[in-house]
């Protein structure tokens, strides 16, 4: 009986480590999608000798050598670091109203991060505090909602950030040209962040299914938590070694 109980505990530990690893991976991949500027890209292909591009995420963008004119008098706009769209008024002097789809994508991006963090926080407390079947299923529902929100944030390809990016529209006005947008593809292409988002969505949903199907693990044991807790020192151990020697000599 004791051997069987020990085997069950070890299996629970391995399962917990696997679930936490997958959850942290999903959180990292989802953050790359939603909080970087590499989710989609708009390449500029009208100048074969110089390829510019505008990379974008739900909240930020960056550019590399966007060319306004060709030839000797060519000018370009490059921003190698990610800048928030909310800073457009400071960067380029324009105020842009986001379309409903862009707003929805941003809301889903935040919700995916918050729900995923709450679910992982619950899993993190399992070894020392245990969990009831009710809370275990609730964590699964949280991760399920995180996966749904993560997937909905992929709708960035259906927003104005993809089809009518505000940075290109503003640069059109600022440069005095009306054909800058024609030098870019009609629609965006998926970038590394978008692929990370797909992987994060799959991982969140897989974790949710595991928590909704697997039985709730028991608390590991009190010994495990006590072993990893700092050991209090006695008054004698806290004494300065030199002082201890002097006390011993007096005795």
Image (cartoon, rainbow, N blue to C red):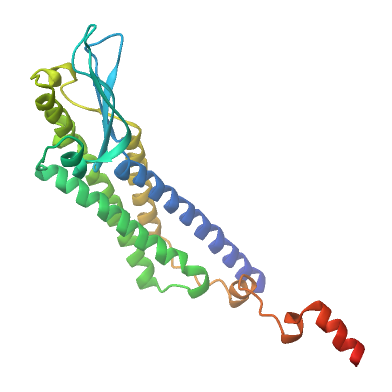
In the image, residue 20 sits, relative to residue 164, either above or below, namely: below
Residue in the foreground of this view, choosing between 207 and 125:
125
Q: Which of the 4 image quarters holds residue 48?
A: top left
Q: Residue at x 58, y 67 (%)?
A: 9
For residue 176, side relative to residue 54 (left or right): left
Position in image of residue 160 (x %, y %): 13, 35
In the image, residue 229 sits, relative to residue 55, either above or below, namely: below
Q: Residue at x 13, y 30 (%)?
A: 170
The quarter of the picture where the C terminus appears is: bottom right
Residue 212 showing in the rendered view: no
Position in image of residue 212 (x %, y %): 36, 61
Residue in the foreground of this view, choosing between 99 and 142:
99
In the image, residue 209 sits, relative to residue 196, either above or below, namely: below
Residue in the foreground of this view, choosing between 6 and 89:
89
For residue 32, side relative to residue 240 (left or right): left
Residue 222 showing in the rendered view: yes
For residue 13, side relative to residue 206 (left or right): right
Position in image of residue 120 (x %, y %): 40, 60
Q: How many marks?
A: 0
Residue in the foreground of this view, choosing between 243 and 61:
243
Q: Residue at x 52, y 69 (%)?
A: 127
The residue lying furthest to the top in this view is 71
Q: Which of the 4 image quarters holds residue 182?
A: top left
């Amino acid at each position: 009986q004791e051997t069987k109980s020990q085997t069950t505990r070890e299996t629970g530990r391995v399962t917990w480590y696997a679930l936490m690893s997958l959850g942290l991976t999903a959180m990292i991949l989802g953050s790359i999608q939603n909080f970087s500027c590499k989710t989609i890209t708009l390449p500029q292909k009208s100048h074969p000798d110089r390829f510019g591009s505008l990379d974008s995420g739900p909240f930020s963008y960056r550019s590399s050598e966007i060319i306004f004119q060709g030839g000797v008098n060519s000018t370009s706009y490059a921003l190698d670091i990610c800048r928030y769209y909310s800073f457009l008024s400071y960067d380029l002097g324009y105020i842009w109203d986001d379309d409903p789809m862009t707003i929805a994508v941003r809301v889903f991006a935040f919700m995916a991060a918050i729900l995923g963090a709450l679910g992982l926080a619950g899993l993190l407390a399992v070894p020392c505090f245990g969990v009831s079947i009710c809370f275990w299923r609730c964590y699964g529902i949280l991760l399920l909602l995180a996966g749904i929100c993560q997937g909905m944030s992929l709708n960035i390809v259906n927003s104005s950030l993809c089809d009518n990016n505000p940075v290109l529209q503003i640069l059109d006005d600022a440069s005095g040209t009306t054909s800058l947008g024609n030098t870019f593809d009609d629609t965006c292409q998926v970038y590394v962040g978008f692929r990370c988002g797909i992987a994060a969505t799959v991982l969140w949903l897989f974790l949710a299914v595991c928590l909704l199907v697997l039985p709730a693990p028991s608390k590991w044991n009190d010994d495990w938590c006590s072993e990893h807790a700092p050991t209090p020192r006695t008054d004698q151990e806290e004494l300065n070694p030199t002082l201890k020697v002097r006390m011993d000599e007096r005795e």
